[in-house]
Image (cartoon, rainbow, N blue to C red):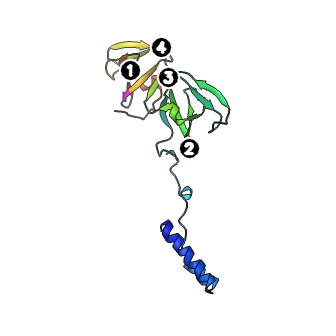
Amino acid sequence: MNRKQFLAGMAAALLGESLGVGRAQAQEELPVAPAPDDKIPRDPNKGPVTNLPLPRYVSLKGREGNVRRGPGMTNRIDWVFTTSGMPLRITAEYDRWRRVEDYQGMGGWMMFNLLSGSRSVLVTQDMAEFRDSPDAQARVLFQAELGVIGKLLECNTDWCRVNAGGEKGWILKTALWGVDPAETLN
């Protein structure tokens, strides 16, 4: 039932009551209002605003982003992320706000426009080896220090191809933060 049908039914019921039709009869003719959208059960693994998976990874769009205690400009800024491209995990959504956390689990609420859908990863192993193919026996192309951020290019079940500082190579997923263990990306 649409809004127009609902309002027409209400008007008819009210008119009937003013013309002497009994209250019980008028109530029987009243249409049932549709349930509000907030009553429809939502998938807890999907964001209520974007309908995208939760949790999911994004990156910091600019050079800095304020992290607030709650979703609103009046909430206190707890700290500022200052590394462009830093991978973050979105764990909740509210209006134009996203609750994010970094690789240490520290987080808060940020405006959605401070985040990018471009995927990045953080190297979590010191002197992690990047190889020319997704194979432990493949030739090592370069190494990266703990904390290096790279652009995520693709992933299979165990390896990800990453662009770190202009160099591209394959690295074990276990040496990265910013991609889920079972996630594949083409």
Give the residues in magenta. Answer: 153-162
Q: Find disc 2 in the rendering and name its residue.
A: 95
Mark positioned earlier in the residue sequence (2 or 3): 3
For the residue labelled by badge 4, is the local secondary structure a helix, a strand or a loop? loop
Q: Which mark identifies residue 163?
A: 1
Q: Find disc 3 in the rendering and name its residue.
A: 84
Counting from the top left corner in percent of width and height, residue 48 is at 52, 47
In which quadrant will I find the C terminus?
Answer: top left
Amino acid at the residue labelled 1: Asn
Mark positioned earlier in the residue sequence (3 or 4): 3
Classify 81 as above or below 89: above
Label 1 close to label 2 by CB (< 8 Å):
no
For the residue labelled by badge 2, is the local secondary structure a helix, a strand or a loop? loop
Amino acid at the residue labelled 2: Asp
Amino acid at the residue labelled 4: Glu
Counting from the top left corner in percent of width and height, residue 34 is at 53, 65
Say which quarter of the image contains residue 107: top right
